[in-house]
Structures are given as C-alpha cells and as structure tokens.
Amino acid sequence: MDVSDLLTETYDRLPDLVRAAVDGLSPEQLRRAPGKGANPVGWLVWHLTRVQDHHVADLLDAEQIWESGDWAGRFGLAADPHNTGYDHTPAQVAEVRPESAQALIDYYGAVAARTGTFLAGLRPADLDRVVDESWDPPVTLGVRLVSIADDDLQHAGQAAYVRGLVEAD
C-alpha cells in the first residue's frame, strides 16, 4: 500500500462517521448541547468539516469550499474563512445553527471530495514538504494530513457519543 492509498483509506472512513452522527436528527437535536459548556452534534460535525476545509484549502492555496455557494447561510453564519470553531465560546458555539442534518452531510461531502482528489495525487516525497514554518520543528505535509485526520476522527467520535446522549433525552 502506498502513502496515497493509506491516507485515502483513513479519510474515506469519515463520510460514514459523519452521516452516522447526524442522519435523522432534527435541527433542534443537532443544536442541543448535552450539558452546560458542552458542544452539540451539529457544532462538532461543522467544526471537523471546517478544519478540514480550511487546512486542505491552505495546502492547495485555494479558496475554501465554505466561501463558495451558500454553505455559511445553511448554518446561520457569515462566510468568514477564519471561523473554524477554534476557541469558540459557548455563545459562538450556539450561533452555529445547521438547517438540517443534510446540510452537514452535504458540506462534509463537498470537502471530502476535494480532499480525496488531493490525496489521490500524493507521492511519498510530497509528505516531506514543509507547509508551516511557524512551528518548531516546521510542519510537513505528512504531519499536517495526520493532524487533520486525527482532529476529524476525534470529533466524529465525540459527535457519535453526543448523539447518543441527545437521543436518550
């Protein structure tokens, strides 16, 4: 298995995890936090998608999918390319209002499609390219792709857990 196949295998698990976390939930359930200061399912899936969209767009030196079409409007937000959910306060978390589970599935699907195309063209030597010199040591493409997958997989698991709490109410 080459590096492109390995990364594709990892990232290809996310669409099913996203769908399983949100499919069939009402907008109210997507927005319901399981407790004070906790993140709702909708925010968790929106955030993992925003992180992937933001970071992959940066790797491609391209516009984020978030900035095209009406993605932001489907979440009750402005199309601010810097708003990925990092350091959100509880009030900011509450501002993320997905119109439906399908909005989350569709946005993730669009982001995943672009990520898949990017991953398909990778060669082993590409992974050593430095993509962020603001860290010590500098971050390579390989490290960045693992970081994105790690963040997304953790948040997908959290969303699945929160879904169980919301459905138990």
Image (cartoon, rainbow, N blue to C red):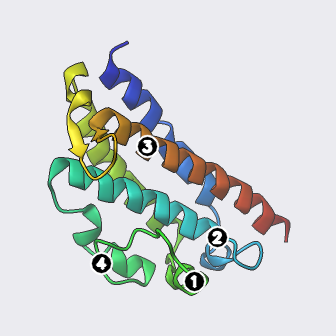
Separation (CA) of disc 2 from disc 3: 21 Å
**Element type where label 1 sits in the image:** helix
* Cα gap from disc 3 to disc 1, whole angstroms: 26 Å
Give the spatial CA distance, label 1 vs label 2: 9 Å
Residue 103 in the image: state x and y as whole percent.
45, 68
- Element under disc 2: loop
Q: Quadrant of the N terminus?
A: top left
The kind of residue tagged 3 is Ser
Question: Residues at badges 2 and 3 in contact (C-beta under 8 Å)?
Answer: no
- Mark 4 crowdedness (10 Å alpha carbons): few <14, some 14-19, many ≥20: few
Whole-percent x, y for residue 39 in the image: 64, 70
Decide which of tag 2 and tag 3 comes sooner along the chain. 2
What residue is disc 3 on? 147
User: Is 20 displayed left or right of 134 in the figure?
Assistant: right
> Which residue is at the far right?
168
Residue 40 lies, in percent from the top left, at 64, 70
Q: Amino acid at mark 1?
A: Ala
Q: Is residue 127 above or below residue 54?
A: above
Residue at mark 4: 80
